[in-house]
Amino acid sequence: AQSVSQHNHHVILSEAASLELGCNYSYGGTVNLFWYVQYPGQHLQLLLKYFSGDPLVKGIKGFEAEFIKSKFSFNLRKPSVQWSDTAEYFCAGTYDRGSTLGRLYFGRGTQLTVWP
Amino acid sequence: DAGITQSPRYKITETGRQVTLMCHQTWSHSYMFWYRQDLGHGLRLIYYSAAADITDKGEVPDGYVVSRSKTENFPLTLESATRSQTSVYFCASTPGTVKSGANVLTFGAGSRLTVL
């Protein structure tokens, strides 16, 4: 079965620290991968996405993620976090097959807390 | 942007009552989804719809009913609410074709439901 897993449930950092959030997926075929962010009290917003091509994708607000097929990973990174990055981060994947097109499988989420 | 709206945003009900959560999108997206978000579980798919009059179960469909008589609306009904259905419910939509950027879900603001 397809799945997405996030191993860090809660990450606490100080401002200016570097961030890396882990994400692994389990499907061996064609995958599309996403990172969504949910700020406190708000709905999910797309941070970045990978469909094909360059495995290093850049998103909004200085975030980037690297697709490593051999490791089934799509980790999210940011060189220097800010207090305003405090949010919950969700990795998600979809598997490009017929009727499930558009159906996302979400990880459980990682709560990031950044201290000023 | 107000392209996808959910109502009500907050609802308190009692066990056994019927509750309907509304979702309306203005983009004529083919695919629509209902997710529930619970602490420790991330987002779990309840139902999704590929087009008007086409719906399918997700991971956790028990206790829920959906309909899609019009492309723009995708209501979710709890026929007899239970306490375990206390959650935040998110509606989402996507165009439905890979070339048009499908698989990039756009989420509504969420409906917080409390069942007493």
Image (cartoon, grey):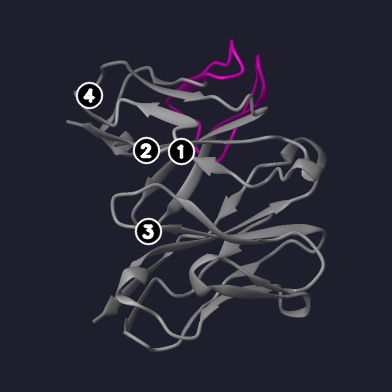
Q: Is residue B16 left or right of residue A23?
A: left
Q: Which residues are magenta?
A: B47-73
Q: Earlier in the sequence, mark 4 or mark 2?
A: 4
Query: In the rendering, at what x and y percent does residue A35 appear?
Result: 56, 62
Label at residue B110: 2
Given the image, on which type of amino acid does mark 3 rest?
Gly
Q: Earlier in the sequence, mark 2 or mark 3?
A: 3
Mark 3 packing: few (<14 Cα in 10 Å), some, or many (20+)?
Answer: few
Q: Marks 1 and 3, how far apart in space? A: 29 Å
Q: Which residue is mark 4?
A: B15
- Residue A36 appears at what percent x and percent y? 51, 58
Residue located farthest toward the top when viewing the structure as drawn: B69
The quadrant the C terminus of chain B occupies is: top left
Q: Amino acid at mark 1?
A: Asp
Mark 4–mark 1 Cα distance, whole angstroms, equals 34 Å
Nearer-the-camera pick, B12 or B22? B22
| Residue for point 44% across, 33% down | B2
Q: State which mark lies toward you, 2 or 3.
A: 2
The residue at 62%/48% (across/down) is A104
